[in-house]
Image: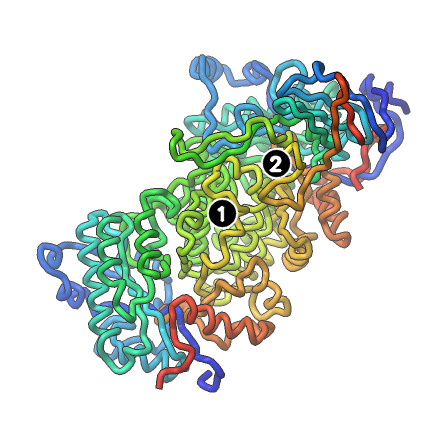
């Protein structure tokens, strides 16, 4: 796969190419950058887990468990699709910020994304 | 030598130093692959019982329905389970992560309802390893070592199985289950230790999880989640260590080597203090020849995965120094399980003074491994 | 030790009835005529001395059954200023009614003989014993004693059918918090309904048995953390009264290491596990605990916050009898002061001054 140079703007996709709930890994930098569409908003993260170096974007996105006494089992999923979970150790990170409430010092790298016309543009 | 040789599964003449021995790697049989090796008497029975059965997991690791307790990226493209493709394991673990030698520990041998059944599964698993992983086609690179799986709950049959496979060029250890009651100090297990020491093979145990006899029963009742269950699993190993020591197994078998796989290890530090304190207070009543901690350091090894990760790394370094980790730890990755430890990451966290002993030298000594292996062009070197 | 600049607290002194007949004398019928074990049974008893030298009574009554003898030993001879009494019973009874009758008699005996009368009454503090298999009755018993000025703790057995995080124990934690009393969990003596003492069944030696059993607190503690007990009861304080605090360090590292991914299964306990330890978890520091008199003992005590969790306890009159002289010399003065006095004084609300 052709590697793209780092530290500049890249048109990585058109908006239709990454539907809500979907993602695309683009070959920027050493590990690649994952571009995610969460309910119409685009986010970009490094395809690299800061814990042990797992390929983060192979992991599944889902929400976060929260207490909900009204539901059977006492828990519910909140903010569906807003977190990426590493395919190795299942550590979760918020796509928008790259961080977690539990251990904020372990954060993933995020990149600015903007949409211009039909283009999704990542600065990475 | 070129990449083409790897594609063609051919070795050149160049040798390289072994820098990483991975003492915990799991191969799984593809669907139907084990059945032909099951002794005839049990083959039909197991097949009949297995008809239509589904998942039996309880104490589920995170996101189980999607990850099956595996590294999600370790499932082969053919739809089979993680760890079923010897070539994928070779590529991900040996070529891309830098484990030079992988000691295979199959986990498909438990689950028998009787001792004879467990033994039959052990027999099948050994034949399957020999045919499907350690054979010249799949072990062309000579980087795989197997485990002589033995049914510890049938000690005489287990000893026979050890005799059967001892001397195999690629069988590096005896592998037993850790959960069977009673604990290992019981003299009923003597035949197993006897057979293993006769052939200078270490005896390793991996944690498993089945029903009843294959499940560690906490003395205060069942834990609630995989989290508290998995963490407290170490206490089973701690108790086995105490049984081995206080029941005098190492006095009975002075060359016995025991390897605890995936039971964690930092608890051995306070456990050695505790055993020594009890020995000092009550020693003579056990008839031991030495201090408990000395038996540990001479006879017992622990694999590193999952590497404990305290907030302050200096605390880990100190604990490793105080326990003399350079004498008792063996690197392991646990590939392809979800708790996989990357060799490069582990090497980075081991104090330099101990790094070579823990990453490879202790394992070379414990498992009688070669210190060089045929080179593989393009292989990642972990450190 | 009497020249110490601060009071000394012995956080673990075990007391007994004088005899089986003495206990029965404190019980009413139909229970007084029932069959139940005494605290001393042969099953996994130490094959040598069960009790420390000098603790036997000339009249043949049980060790640590006479307040004056115990007071003299703890305060006059060993130099302590306060002692937390933790009565031992004869085991967890299958019949909860019988169990309640025994434990209530035990609590009444402790109050009458040790806390309300006698020359050392103002230096003794008591632990009331309750049966976790009968939560309703246990809550009643806590309410009954909570206003007694010298009751400072609730005592539970380590051996249970289920770990203490399970939800049916919640009323106990609520009652303990309402009463502002810490809960001490200690191995029960005697015989009774327990699972096998180790995950691999019974031990073959006393050494293994006595080494493993105290470590079982980890099952309870880790279950309480994952079940969110300390989240729901932020005031709850638990004392693991058989020691083995050293095992907390590696085991909480391990629990934290697996904390992040597993938190998704336990949103009722959303913090990293080690965050639930401070102000909630305490240990009696006994004779078998610690790394010995080594250079790094102070650093070890600091790790994972143990220096703020330990309470020195002698376990008088047990054979394991611990002495402050044996505490590691590398501990700092501040660590020593915390373990021998300050932490226990805070936990049990004891005065900073030595009673006259």
Q: x%, y% of residue B144?
A: 71, 29
Q: x%, y% of residue A20?
A: 63, 19
Which quadrant of the figure has residue B380?
Answer: top right
The structure residue drawn at horizontal position 63% and vertical position 41%, both measured from the top left corner, is B305
Q: x%, y% of residue A46?
A: 74, 32
Residue A2 seen in the figure: yes
The circle on residue C123 is: none
| Total marks in image | 2
Determine which residue is flagged by label 2: A91
Question: How many angstroms separate mark 1 from mark 2 (CA)?
Answer: 25 Å
Q: Residue furthest left?
A: C29
- Placement of the C terminus of chain B among the 4 image quadrants: top right
Q: Is residue C75 above or below residue B19?
A: below
Q: Secondary structure at mark 2?
A: loop
The structure residue drawn at horizontal position 25% and vertical position 76%, both measured from the top left corner, is C66
Residue nearest the viewer, comparing C334 with B119:
C334
Which quadrant of the figure has residue B132?
Answer: top right
Dot 2, how many residues are within 10 Å of its Cα: few (below 14), some (14-19), or many (20+)?
many
Residue B169 seen in the figure: no
Determine which residue is flagged by label 1: B235
* Mark 1 touches mark 2? (CB < 8 Å): no
Residue nearest the viewer, comparing A59 with B297:
A59
Q: Residue furthest right?
A: B1
- Placement of the N terminus of chain B among the 4 image quadrants: top right
Q: Secondary structure at mark 1?
A: helix
Chain of the residue where label 1 is placed in the rendered structure: B
Chain of the residue where label 2 is placed in the rendered structure: A
Kindly report which numbered mark, 1 or 2, lies closer to the viewer in this rendering. 2
Q: Is residue B81 left or right of residue B134?
A: left
Q: Is residue B215 above or below residue B75?
A: below
């Amino acid at each position: 796969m052709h590697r793209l140079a780092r530290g500049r703007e890249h048109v990585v996709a058109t908006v239709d190419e990454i539907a809500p709930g979907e993602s695309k890994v683009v070959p920027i930098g050493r590990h690649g950058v994952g571009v995610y569409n969460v309910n119409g908003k685009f986010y970009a993260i490094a395809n690299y887990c800061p814990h042990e170096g797992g390929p983060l974007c192979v992991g599944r996105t889902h929400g976060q468990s929260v207490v909900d006494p009204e539901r059977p089992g006492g828990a519910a999923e909140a903010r569906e699709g807003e977190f990426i979970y590493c395919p190795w150790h299942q550590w979760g990170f918020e796509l928008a910020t790259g961080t977690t409430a539990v251990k904020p010092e372990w954060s993933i790298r995020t990149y600015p994304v903007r949409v211009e016309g039909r283009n999704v543009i990542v600065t990475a | 030598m070129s990449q083409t040789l790897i594609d063609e599964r051919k070795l050149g003449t160049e040798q390289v130093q072994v820098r990483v021995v991975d003492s915990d790697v799991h191969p799984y049989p593809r669907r139907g692959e084990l059945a032909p090796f099951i002794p005839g008497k049990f083959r039909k029975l197991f097949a009949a019982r297995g008809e239509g059965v589904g998942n039996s997991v309880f104490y589920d690791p995170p996101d189980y329905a999607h990850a099956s307790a595996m590294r999600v990226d370790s499932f082969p493209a053919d739809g089979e389970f993680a760890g079923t493709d010897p070539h994928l394991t070779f590529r991900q673990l040996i070529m891309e992560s830098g484990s030079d030698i992988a000691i295979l520990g199959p986990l498909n041998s438990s689950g028998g309802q009787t001792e004879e059944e467990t033994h039959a599964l052990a027999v099948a698993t050994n034949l399957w390893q020999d045919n499907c992983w350690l054979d010249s086609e799949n072990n062309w690179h000579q980087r795989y070592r197997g485990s002589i799986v033995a049914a510890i709950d049938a000690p005489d049959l287990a000893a026979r199985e050890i005799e059967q496979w001892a001397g195999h060029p690629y069988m590096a250890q005896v592998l037993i289950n850790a959960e069977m009651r009673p604990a290992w100090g019981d003299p009923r297990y003597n035949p197993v230790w006897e057979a293993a020491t006769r052939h200078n093979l270490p005896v390793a145990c991996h944690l498993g999880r089945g029903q009843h006899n294959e499940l560690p029963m906490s003395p205060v009742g069942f834990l609630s989640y995989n989290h508290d269950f998995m963490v407290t699993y170490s206490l089973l190993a701690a108790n086995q260590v105490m049984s081995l020591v206080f029941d005098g197994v190492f006095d009975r078998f002075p060359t016995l080597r025991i390897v605890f796989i995936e039971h964690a290890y930092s608890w051995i530090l306070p456990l050695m203090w505790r055993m020594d304190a009890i020995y000092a207070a009550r020693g003579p009543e056990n008839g031991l020849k030495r201090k408990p901690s000395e038996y540990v350091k001479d006879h017992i090894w622990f694999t590193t995965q999952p590497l404990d990760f305290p907030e302050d790394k200096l605390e880990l370094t100190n604990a490793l120094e105080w326990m003399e980790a350079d004498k008792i730890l063996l690197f392991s990755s646990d590939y392809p399980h979800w708790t996989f430890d990357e060799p490069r990451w582990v090497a980075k966290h081991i104090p330099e003074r101990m790094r070579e002993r823990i990453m490879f030298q202790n394992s070379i000594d414990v498992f009688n491994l070669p210190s060089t292996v045929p080179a593989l062009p393009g292989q990642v070197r972990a450190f | 030790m009497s020249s110490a600049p601060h009071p000394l607290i012995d956080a673990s002194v075990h007391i007994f009835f004088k005899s089986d007949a003495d206990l029965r004398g404190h019980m009413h019928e139909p229970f007084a005529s029932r069959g139940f074990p005494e605290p001393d049974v042969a099953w996994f008893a130490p094959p040598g001395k069960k009790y420390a030298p000098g603790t036997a009574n000339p009249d043949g009554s049980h060790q640590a059954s006479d307040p004056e003898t115990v007071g003299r030993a703890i305060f006059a001879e060993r130099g302590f200023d306060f002692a937390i009494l933790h009565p031992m019973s004869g085991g967890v009874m299958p019949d909860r009614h019988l169990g309640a009758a025994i434990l209530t008699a035990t609590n009444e005996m402790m109050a009458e003989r040790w806390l309300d009368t006698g020359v050392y009454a103002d230096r003794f503090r008591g632990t009331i014993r309750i049966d976790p298999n009968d939560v309703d009755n246990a809550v009643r018993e806590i309410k009954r004693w909570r206003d007694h000025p010298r009751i400072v703790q609730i005592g539970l057995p380590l051996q249970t059918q289920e770990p203490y995080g399970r939800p049916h124990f919640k009323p106990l934690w609520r009652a303990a918090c309402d009463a502002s009393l810490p809960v001490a969990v200690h191995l029960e003596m005697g015989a009774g309904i327990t699972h096998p003492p180790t995950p691999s069944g019974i031990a073959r030696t006393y050494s293994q048995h006595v080494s493993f059993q105290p470590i079982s607190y980890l099952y309870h503690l880790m279950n309480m953390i994952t079940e969110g007990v300390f989240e729901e009861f932020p005031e709850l304080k638990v004392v693991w009264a058989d020691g083995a605090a050293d095992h907390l360090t590696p085991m909480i590292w391990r629990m934290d290491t697996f904390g992040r991914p597993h938190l998704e299964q336990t949103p009722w306990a959303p913090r990293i596990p080690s965050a639930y330890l401070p102000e909630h978890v305490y240990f009696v520091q006994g004779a078998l605990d610690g790394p010995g008199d080594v250079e790094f003992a102070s650093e070890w005590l600091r790790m994972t916050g143990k220096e703020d969790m330990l309470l020195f306890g002698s376990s008088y009159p047990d054979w394991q009898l611990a002495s402050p002289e044996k505490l590691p010399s590398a501990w700092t003065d501040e660590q020593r002061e915390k373990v021998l006095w300050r932490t226990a004084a805070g936990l049990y609300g004891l005065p900073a001054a030595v009673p006259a």
